[in-house]
Image (spheres, coloured by chain):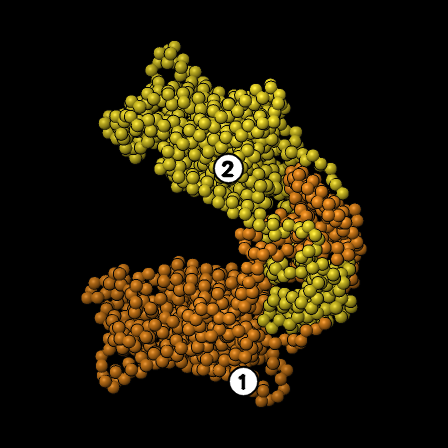
Chain colours: A yellow, B orange
Amino acid sequence: MSKLTDVPKRILIGRALRSDRLGETLLPKRVALPVFASDPLSSVAYAPGEVLLVLSVAGLSAYHFSPWIAVAIVVLMFTVVASYRQNVRAYPSGGGDYEVVTTNIGPRAGRTVASALLVDYVLTVAVSISAGVENLGSAVPFVVEHKVACAIGVIVLLTLMNLRGVRESGTLFAIPTYVFVAGVFTMIAWGAFRSVVLGDEMRAPTADYEISPEHPGLAGFALVFLLLRAFASGCAALTGVEAISNGVPAFRKPKSKNAATTLAMMGLLAVTMFCGIIALATATDVRMAENPARDLFHDGVPLGSDYVQHPVISQVAEAVFGQGSPLFLLLAAATALVLFLAANTAYNGFPLLGSILAQDRYLPRQLHTRGDRLAFSNGIVLLAAGAGVLVWAYGASTTRLIQLYIVGVFMSFTLSQIGMVRHWNRLLATEKQQAARRGMIRSRAINTFGAFFTGLVLVVVLVTKFTHGAWVALLGMGFFYALMTAIRRHYDSVLEEIAAPEVPGDDMVRPSRVHSVVLVSKVHRPALRALAYAKLMRSDSLEALSVNVDAEETRALHAEWERRGIEVPLKVLDSPYREVTRPVIEYVKNLRKESPRDVVSVIIPEYVVGHWYEQLLHNQSALRLKARLLFTPGVMVTSVPYQLQSSEAARRRARKRANWAAPGSVRRGPAERSKDSSPHT
Amino acid sequence: MSKLTDVPKRILIGRALRSDRLGETLLPKRVALPVFASDPLSSVAYAPGEVLLVLSVAGLSAYHFSPWIAVAIVVLMFTVVASYRQNVRAYPSGGGDYEVVTTNIGPRAGRTVASALLVDYVLTVAVSISAGVENLGSAVPFVVEHKVACAIGVIVLLTLMNLRGVRESGTLFAIPTYVFVAGVFTMIAWGAFRSVVLGDEMRAPTADYEISPEHPGLAGFALVFLLLRAFASGCAALTGVEAISNGVPAFRKPKSKNAATTLAMMGLLAVTMFCGIIALATATDVRMAENPARDLFHDGVPLGSDYVQHPVISQVAEAVFGQGSPLFLLLAAATALVLFLAANTAYNGFPLLGSILAQDRYLPRQLHTRGDRLAFSNGIVLLAAGAGVLVWAYGASTTRLIQLYIVGVFMSFTLSQIGMVRHWNRLLATEKQQAARRGMIRSRAINTFGAFFTGLVLVVVLVTKFTHGAWVALLGMGFFYALMTAIRRHYDSVLEEIAAPEVPGDDMVRPSRVHSVVLVSKVHRPALRALAYAKLMRSDSLEALSVNVDAEETRALHAEWERRGIEVPLKVLDSPYREVTRPVIEYVKNLRKESPRDVVSVIIPEYVVGHWYEQLLHNQSALRLKARLLFTPGVMVTSVPYQLQSSEAARRRARKRANWAAPGSVRRGPAERSKDSSPHT
């Protein structure tokens, strides 16, 4: 069964799971953590740097505020984690923020959250890949010299992998994530040991630089505003926390409890790493600036546009482990890999969210079908194109992309927590049992605080970042919102139009007879087969129809018809302008006019070939005729396919496609078995 | 009926002919001449210049050879015209070179001619438009300063006009062509009068320049080679002469005689104009060079890259009429317009040749249908793209494009004349009557001389121009030849595969029963209609089939089914992975496996909407299912369309499209009425 080419793939990502074995794979916590946490954990690779960067606007002295900002982010992280632990318990179905908000607040808020999430997926890809390239670039200078090209290269690679249908595997996530986490913790521990015990003076590569503040001596309201902006940038560390709430069905039982525990573990890890990196950055005198070329000086000389500002995590690693040391290189590689995995989670999430939205008729219905390669492909290509444009437009700069990033996240956080508060209110209205009530009241309190706090952050983010780029994200959300509204309106109006009447036949003329027409051009196997099938159908009348495009061919057709004694009458339509479509359409319309209660069944023999370019050589008139006939009322159009030998190739391809594995299956958990899964008759 | 927007169009091109009035429009000679002759007549606008240009390589003294080259071209023109008068008489059907060669030499030679003609059509557009822009540029400097952009602009304009379906009208051709011819004759006459009678010394704007010859003092073989190259370039004057032989059916009766007369008139006009312009150029001391920037000097200083070399016809007109005089401007405008019309003839010829080639199964069959908008559109876009690329690649330089141009023309001339010789040989083998034999022997002699002469020119063109660009044209022909061969091979193999067996049923299992399956997802009007139609068909068994993608929807479907008491049994297929296609395909395959002699009829309700973007929201699973079902043997696939209100818009558009007028109808003459045009039953 397996081919030779599968071997490298299997080495790379582990043995592929067969689709029907999907139901057996449930994730233990130690695998679920890396699968769901690569996104939030990886953000500690860029979030601390963004905080320092913003603070530098007020000069080096403002760096002293960084521990306070770290504390605020830790509090926020605990709040969000505690809030989502309630979500996970209340919605073990894995509906996520969209389901919570739609159910508890309403469809408009639901669409808002969905728009925010869609934009966020695009930004996750753009930000994570840009950050990954920057981290890789701290070890491999070539990468950072061709930043945009490398970032787009990674996007293309991820896109191709996902289009081909690479299945997520626990191992694929586990190894780099655990290496990354272990590396950061080793760094923090070794740094603390060197500093406290050995008394080493560790110095970051940028420690000797001076910062020329854009606004020196900032104070009062302006300083508060700057601190809030720094805090808002640091909130990037919280992106992806909600992922687990979408993935509860993938956990082993007890699902909700395990998911909640994993969420707590993830929060703890992220917070510790974030604070450790900030602490090390302070200890090693890392210097970062928003405009390093202009605002960073060495011996009084500005560094100039050639200077590449490396991420804070790599500067700290250099200080602790030493430039070019194996541990430094390992950490840089693991960081980049985890960031690319974080981007890959968006490739899984985007089409899955699309399928849920399609189910609610906000997106084209065909996206609804799970594991439908084509639907997923469209989503994947759309996501990649969006991320590619952003990366290109923002020069693959994490700092510039971050400005767009956090709006969507906190919009869905806030709405989700408001939804949860309503959820508990509704339950409390009916719940009588005291113990249960107490639990609900506690949960409601947590969610209320979560809603309040994340709402506050949302306002801070909007106010401090609107002009810096958040407006682009809002524009994107507006686009998705309008699109979904329009699609839903269209589906609703169609639904109304096609709704079956209560009294049968109140507007439909009951058809009385069928007049079958077989289109023939020559007496060949496809035509004979179509005639044979048509005869079997026993319609009220049956005739063969040909269009006289070429007088000689028509004569030959007549002669052959008689010679073979085919008993179906042959009618030939004249077509002075060698058209096929119009004469047939007009003939069919006339038939209908003569007896309006009859149905005309047009039967078209079709060749089936194996390649699209062969397809171009056949059936084109048939296709156009079919398209036109569909607009003619009272007609049914039947294709009788005749499979040519070359069609075997296409059948093989189709079979292969059918075994394609949709991305995101692992994190989504096994498909819900429907309650009535036995075939009905 | 007519809209306001039609008015400017009608002013521009005269009242459009209705498709069914096409049969009444036959061309009198005075209209046929401009319709068919714009291409060959317009080439006198650039051919004389090309001759001088090549001669300049050997220095100013070589200009003295120009009358001899003109004589050679006149002889050649008479030969070609005389030869094609035989074609017109022998083939009044308007088959043209392709028919003559295929009938008399064979399919390979036919394909060669067809390839040459296709390439030639592309080059006609590129060369004529470039020359037109250069002529317009002699009056309007802006145009020549943005030569490539203007040329591509004209291509886009012509393409849009032809895609919209602007019908050729005799008047459209007659006015600019007759103005152009009258202008050139006036110029020649007035120039001769001024020079001979008044004794004026007319001087071209370039008369004072000196030429620095690339190869001064060329002699012997090298000089002969140069003269041959100049002759080959001058042969551009002969392009398009064969057009009349394609258009015989468009002439009034006696068709062949009128066509032959028109051909002679055209030859005479072209030759006179060509010689007159060469004579005036000599008299007014026009100076042209292949590389004017380098090789033309004024007072010993090279003119440099800013210098724009105007076409010889405009330089002569300037000398005769005076720069900026009304007659000069009128002639420049008429020249440009005639050249654009010449380009337009290719827009008509390319798809028509395509339709003939499609009839012989060298190109996709759908091109065969005359007046089929889509088929014509493909040809038009292909032609425009090819010409656009050439214009862009060669900087809209007539001189550089001419190098590619003449190979194809003389390839088809030569093969056509060889074919005619064979034609007469074949007739002479059976003809007994002396008078007829004498005529045939005379015709054969003319065609033999024609074949010999044009063959010689072909060799000269190939030898002198191969490295200058003719290889590009040969490459293009090779591409078309290979494509046509491959397409024909495919069709032949399919034809063999589908040929009906002589003994009926020798390999086809005679189907015995039909099992009908109606796909339903909800109980709505489209589904009810499909069920009603399916019941009418009285197949051996009938059931409704649904795929359980969503347990709740399936339950609702069951309930509704029972509530309405629909008597067709409902079967529900389970689909744990929310797929639609696979369960249905497998179910159908199983049905076939159980009773292989049965046919399965799958009936699919379809929504019909009005816009492509609405279409994206519907039927996608149905479309994919249909595509897969076509690969399943023993299946017939029926669409039962349900027209939504918005589909009315699409029906209107389709009706409008159906009234589209294909380009080239006038020159092609009315369609052959088939001999048995009454409907048969």
State the residue lying farthest toward the bottom.
Answer: B435
Q: CA distance from mark 2 to mark 1?
A: 80 Å
The picture places residue A648, in percent across and down from the top left corner, at 67, 50
Q: Amino acid at mark 2?
A: Ala
Q: Which structural element holds mark 1? A: loop
Q: Which residue is mark 1?
A: B254
| Contact check, label 2 and label 1, Cβ < 8 Å | no
Residue B367, quarter of the rendered image: bottom right
Q: Do discs 2 and 1 share a chain?
A: no
Query: Which callout, 2 or 1, points to the residue nearer the camera?
Result: 2
The picture places residue A53, in percent across and down from the top left corner, at 34, 28
Q: Which structural element holds mark 2? A: helix
The answer to whether residue A250 is left or right of residue A71 is right
Q: Mark 2 Cα within 10 Å, few/some/many (few <14, many 20+)?
A: some
Q: Chain of mark 2?
A: A
Instruction: Please report the residue visible at 53 percent of the width from the left and 21 percent of the height from the top.
Output: A442
Instruction: Please report the residue visible at 55 percent of the width from the left and 63 percent of the height from the top.
Output: B652
State the residue lying farthest toward the top.
Answer: A197
Vertical side of A17 occupied by B199: above or below? below
Inspect this view and state whether residue A551 appears: yes
Q: Which residue is mark 2?
A: A109
